[in-house]
Amino acid sequence: MHSSHMIVELLKLLAASLLLISFAMLSRRRTQRLITLFAWQGSVLFISTLLVAYSAGLTELYFSAALTLLLKVIALPWILHRLIQRLGAQWDSEPLVNIPTTMLVGLGLVIFAFGLAQPISRMATTITRNTIGIALAVIFLAFLMMITRRKAITQVIGFLAMENGLFFAATSATYGMPMVIELGIALDLLVGFFILGIFFFQIREQFDSLDLSNMEALKED
Amino acid sequence: MLPIAHFDAALIARGLPLLLLLVAVWIGLGLIGLLRPHSVRFVARVVFPLGAITCFALGAVAAHFLVSSHAPEVMTLPLGLPDLPFHARLDPLAAFFLLLLGLAGAGISTFAVGYFRSGQGTAPGLHCLQYHVFLASMALVILADDAYFFMVAWETMALSSYFLVTSQHRIPEIRRAGFLYLLMAHIGALCILLSFGVLQGGRWQFTFDAMRGALLTPFWASAAFLLALIGFGAKAGLVPLHAWLPEAHPAAPSPVSALMSGLMLKTAIYGMLRITFDLLHIRYWWWGVLVLGVGLFSALFGAIFAAVQTDMKRLLAYSSIENIGIIFTGIGLAILFAACGLPLFAALALTAALIHSLNHAFFKSLLFLATGSVLHATNQRSLGKLGGLIRRMPWVATLALIGTLAIAGLPPLNGFVSEWLLLQSFLFTPQIPHAFLNMLIPLCAALLALTVALAAYVMVKFYGVIFLGQHREPSLVHAHDADWMERLGLAWLALGCIAIGVMPQLALRVAGAVTGALLGQAVNLSSPFWWIAPIASKQASYSGLILLTGIVGVVGITFVMVRALAHGRIRRTASWDCGYPWQTSRMQDTAEGFGQPIRHMFGPFFRMERELPAPTDTTPHYRIHIEDRLWRALYLPIARYVQRLADWIGLLQGGRLAIYLLYSFLTLIALLVFVR
C-alpha cells in the first residue's frame, strides 16, 4: 500500500515534468534543443510506463515501455539529429511570434484540458487517473506548437510530441491500448517519419529552405 | 418446329426481357465501336446500321405490347447495390415512350450512318459508344421502376449527352454550352432526387410501387409535384429553365441534336407524367393551372424567339422550346380536368400531349437532320448565307418540306392532329367547376392559336430562307445532296409524319392505351378507321385520309388542267425589276428581315443591341444582337451570388499550413466542448 502510494506520487511528478517539457518545447527556438527535449519527453514517458506496468502488474505494458525506449528515446531523436546534420539545419533558429502570448494560450489550453478530463478521471479505475488532464494538455500543447512553428522539422517534432501525449493518455486512462494497436501506431509513426524525412529534402530542393511559409506560393488563385 | 414457336410466343408475350436485351445490345454495340475507334468505315457502316435495327426492334416490341396486352410486366434485375437491386417495369406509359424512342431513333441512327465524316472532334469509336450509351440510358430511364435505378439511368443520360454535345471540344463556345447544359442537368437531377425523397413518404422504400402506395399530405404532395416540375422542366427546357437548350442543341453534331431534341426532351415529359399521373395518388387543380401557364408561356416564348434567330439550329432549338411548351400545355389541361373529376376530357388533353410528343420526335428530328445535311453540304449555319438549296439538294429539300409543313401544323400531316386535339380539349373548359378558370382558359386557347400561327411563320422563314430563292453565297453552287443512307433516315421520319397525319387512328390507339392505364379513360375510338371523333362525332371530327384525297385530287386536277390548257405556252424571261436592273441575290429577303416584324411587335421580350450604319458611312456595317432578358434578369444574378459565396468559402484556403492546422485544432476543441 505504501509503495503504491509512493508510485502514484512519483507518477504525478513525472506527469508534471512531461507538462513542463511541453511548455519548454513551446518556447525553444533552436531545432537541436527541441530534439533533446523530445528525447527527454520520451524518457519520462518510458519511466512512467514502466512504473504503471510494475504497479498494475501488466506484462504488456513492459513491452510498450520497451517500445517507447527504443523508438522515442533512441531511434527517432538519433534519426532527427542525423537528419538536421545532413540538412545543415542544426543551428537553425526560427523567429517565434510572441512567446508570452503563446504561453498564455498554452495555459488556457491546460485549464481547458483539466476541465475536460474531470469526468473521465472520475470514471477511470486506474491508479494514474489523475494524470489524464495532463496527457490531454500535452496533446494540445504539441498541437499549438505545430500551429505556431514554421519550419518543417519542428512541425514533425510537434507531431511526434502529440503522439507522446496520446500514448500517455492511453496509459493513464486504461493502462494502454491493446498491443496490436500500439504496434500498429509505432509502425505508422516510423513510416510517416520516413516519408516526412523524404519530404524535407524535396521541400529544401524546391524552396532552398525548410520554411513552410514558402508553400503559400502553391495556392491556386 | 413446335418448341421454337412456343419459345417465340413466350418471348413476345414477355416484352420486358426482350427490351432489356435490346438495351444490352446497344451497350454492346457501343463497346464494339471501341475495337476500331478510328475507323469511320467500321463504325459508320457496320455498327450504326446494327444500332438502327436495334432501335427499330425496340419500337416494334413496344408497339406490340401496346397493341396486344396492357398488363404491366415487372422484373427485378440482378444489378445494383446489395439489398438495393434495380427494378424494371413495362407498362403502357413506358411502352409509348419506348415506341417513340425506337421509331424516331431508327431514323436518326440510319441518318448517322451517312453523316459520319472523319476528323471531326471525338474519335468515331468513342462517339459511337457515347451515342449508344445515350440511347440505352434513355430506354432505361423509361423502364426503371425504382428511384435509384431511375436516377442512375438519368445521370448516365445527362453525362453521355454532355460528352456528345462537347464532341468538338476544342471550340470554346461549345465547351461553354456543354458546361451550361451539365449545370442545368444537375440542378434538375437534384430536384428530381428531392422529389423522390418526398414521394417515398417517410417509409424509405424507393421502389415506384411503394411510392404509389404512399399517402402524402397536400403540402408534401404539392412539394413533390413542384420539385418534379422544376427537375423535369429543366431537362425539357420549360421557360425560366430553358437557357441551356438554345446553346447545347446547336453545339452538338446534327444526329445528336436530333436525339436530344426529339428524344431526350421526351424522357422529361415521361418523368413528369410518371410522377404526376402514376406515382402521386392525388392531383390538385392549381397544379394544372400552373403547368398550363408555364407551358403556354414557354410555347409563346419559344415561337417568338425562333422567329428572330439567324442560325438555323438555334431556330430549331427555340422551336423545341415552343413544342415542349405545347406538350406541357396539354399536360396542364389534363391535370386540371383530372383534378376536377372529368377523366374523359383529361384523357383527351393527355392524348393530345402524348401524340404531340410523338410528332415532335418525328418532325424535329427530321428538321435537325436536314440542317445537318445542309451543314455538311455548305459548311454554313447562318441563314443569311444560305438560300436556293432546293435546286442543289432536291431530296433534302423535299423531305424537309414535309417536316416543315408538319411542324407548322398543316393538315394532313401529324402536327395538325395533335394541335387540333389540344384545341378541342380547350373547348371543354366550361365544364370546369371554377368560376374564373372557365372564363380565363378560353383566352389561353387564343394564346395557343397565336403560338401555332407563329410557329408556322417561323417555319416559312426556315424553309424559305434555306431552300428557296437564290443562293446568297457563291460557294453554295457546289452544294451536294445527301447520300442515300441519309436520305433513307430522313425519308423514314417523313413517312412517320405522314402516317400519323393521315392515319391518326393509329396514334390515338397507342395513346389510348396509355390514358386508359393512367386515367381509366380513353378517347372515343369506335369510329371507322379513316375517321377520328375523339369525344362525339357531332361535335368535331377529322379525317386525314379524306383531306389527303382532297388535296391530291385538287392538285392533280389543277396540274392536269394547267398541262392541258397552258402547255406549250410557257415563256421564260427575266422578271420585272422595278426599274432597277442591278439586282443581286443579296437583295432577297433575309432571315433578319423576315423576323423584323415579330421583333417589333414583341419588343419587350428581347434585349437588343443594334448597330445601324450612318447614311454617310462608306463601309456600312449592320449588327444586331438579340438576347433573352431572362439571362440577365435571372441567370447572371444567381451566378454572381454563387461566385461571391464561393469567393467567401475560398478565403478558407489561405495557403498557410499553420492556418490549416489551426482549423483542425479549433474543430477538435469545438468537438470536445460539444461532446462534454
Image (spheres, helix red, strand yellow):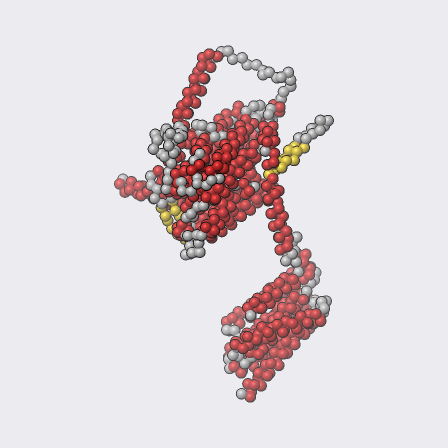
Residue B320 lies, in percent from the top left, at 51, 36
The structure residue drawn at horizontal position 48% and vertical position 41%, both measured from the top left corner, is B289
On screen, residue B102 versus residue B605, left or right, reads left
Task: Residue lying at the far bottom in this picture: please name it.
Answer: A2
The structure residue drawn at horizontal position 52% and vertical position 26%, both measured from the top left corner, is B393
On screen, residue B158 versus residue B645, left or right, reads left
Residue B134 lies, in percent from the top left, at 48, 43
State whether residue A25 is above or below residue B331: below
In this rendering, does residue B424 appear at all?
yes
Residue B456 lies, in percent from the top left, at 51, 29
The structure residue drawn at horizontal position 69% and vertical position 61%, both measured from the top left corner, is A213
Task: Residue lying at the far front in this picture: please name it.
Answer: B435
Task: Residue lying at the far left in this picture: please name it.
Answer: B2
State whether residue B457 is above or below residue B271: above
The structure residue drawn at horizontal position 66% and vertical position 73%, both measured from the top left corner, is A107
- In this rendered view, identify the residue nearer to me: A220 or B92: B92
In this rendering, does residue B327 appear at all?
no
Q: How many marks?
A: 0
Residue B468 lies, in percent from the top left, at 54, 24
- In this rendered view, identify the residue nearer to me: B350 or B409: B350
On screen, residue B518 versus residue A49, left or right, reads left
- In this rendered view, identify the residue nearer to me: B76 or B125: B76
The quadrant in which residue B23 appears is top left
- In this rendered view, identify the residue nearer to me: A179 or B269: B269
The quadrant in which residue B336 appears is top left
